[in-house]
Image (tube, rainbow, N blue to C red):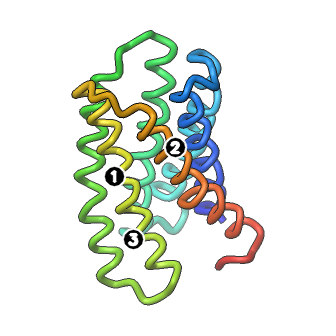
């Protein structure tokens, strides 16, 4: 259920961040969902890493979840401080590179539809973080593309699977 909870709000934040990049949400207002989702995924990661029954697999899941948490908290920080986002862009490159072997490892042992979805989601997230790197660190004019990818991934890698997990339609 923690995965469903996390994915549900990751979907929300990706969709809303995409709308923000398209100018549909104000700079100061977008911080609310980024702080909430960053904080929520941080709490989930802390439970996975330090909670009862923590093991190697749950600590790995926590480490990977923190990539999301830190990204959303950094977006909020940038909106609060007016920072230009270059640091977040370089962090996004680190995350994009990290997500590639996660996707490959996940796909190499995939034995169910869920496993395949998860591996492909990591590949998709890698592309999105790469777009953030190109846009923020290298100042490439790809805001509309990045916004569209964020909205699409918010729906298909976050909100929809999160909702299906929470409703019990996926196990």
Q: Position of residue 75 (x, y in %)?
A: 46, 27
Disc 2 and disc 3 in contact, CB within 8 angstroms:
no
Q: Can you see residue 150?
A: yes
- Left or right: 38, with 61 as reference point: right
Separation of residues labelled 2 and 3 (CA atoms): 22 Å
Numbered circle sitting on residue 42: 2
Task: State which quarter of the image contains the C terminus.
Answer: bottom right
Taking the image as shown, residue 22 lies to the left or right of residue 106, namely right
Above or below, 50 against 35 in this view is below
For disc 3, the neighbor class at 10 Å (few under 14, some 14 to 19, many from 20) is many
> Relative to residue 129, is residue 47 drawn left or right?
right
Tag 3 secondary structure: helix
User: Viewed as shown, does residue 142 lie left or right of 39?
Assistant: left
Marks 1 and 3, Cα distance to the nearest angstrom? 13 Å
The disc, 2 or 1, on the residue closer to the chain's N-terminal end is: 2
Measuring from the top left, give residue 139's x and y in whole percent: 27, 24
In this view of the protein, which residue sits in the foreground, 155 or 73?
A: 155
- Is residue 88 something one can see in this rendering? no
In this rendering, the answer to whether 25 lies above or below 50 is above
Q: Which residue is mark 1?
A: 127
Most extreme residue toward the top is 82
How crowded is the residue under tag 2: few (<14 C-alpha within 10 Å), some, or many (20+)?
A: many
Discs 2/1, front: 1
User: How far across and how far down the image is residue 67, in percent?
Assistant: 39, 46
Q: Secondary structure at mark 1?
A: helix
Q: Quadrant of residue 108?
A: bottom left
Q: Quadrant of residue 129?
A: top left
User: Mark 2 to mark 1: distance in Å?
Assistant: 23 Å
Helix, strand or loop at disc 2? helix
Q: Residue at x 40, y 69 (%)?
A: 120
Query: Which of disc 3 and disc 2 is earlier in sequence?
Result: 2
* Dot 1 or dot 3, earlier in sequence: 3
């Amino acid at each position: 259920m923690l995965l469903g909870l996390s994915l549900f709000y990751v979907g929300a934040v990706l969709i809303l961040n995409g709308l923000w990049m398209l100018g549909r949400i104000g700079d100061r207002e977008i911080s609310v969902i980024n702080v909430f989702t960053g904080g929520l995924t941080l709490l989930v990661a802390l439970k996975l890493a330090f909670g009862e029954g923590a093991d190697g697999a749950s600590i790995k899941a926590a480490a990977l979840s923190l990539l999301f948490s830190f990204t959303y908290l950094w977006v909020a920080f940038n909106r609060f401080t007016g920072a230009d986002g270059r640091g977040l862009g370089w962090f996004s490159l680190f995350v994009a590179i990290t997500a590639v072997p996660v996707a490959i490892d996940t796909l190499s042992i995939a034995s169910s539809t869920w496993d395949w979805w998860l591996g492909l989601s990591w590949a998709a997230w890698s592309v999105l973080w790469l777009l953030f790197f190109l846009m923020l660190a290298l100042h490439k004019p790809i805001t509309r593309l990045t916004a569209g990818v964020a909205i699409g991934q918010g729906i298909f890698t976050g909100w929809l699977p999160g909702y299906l997990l929470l409703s019990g339609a996926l196990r």
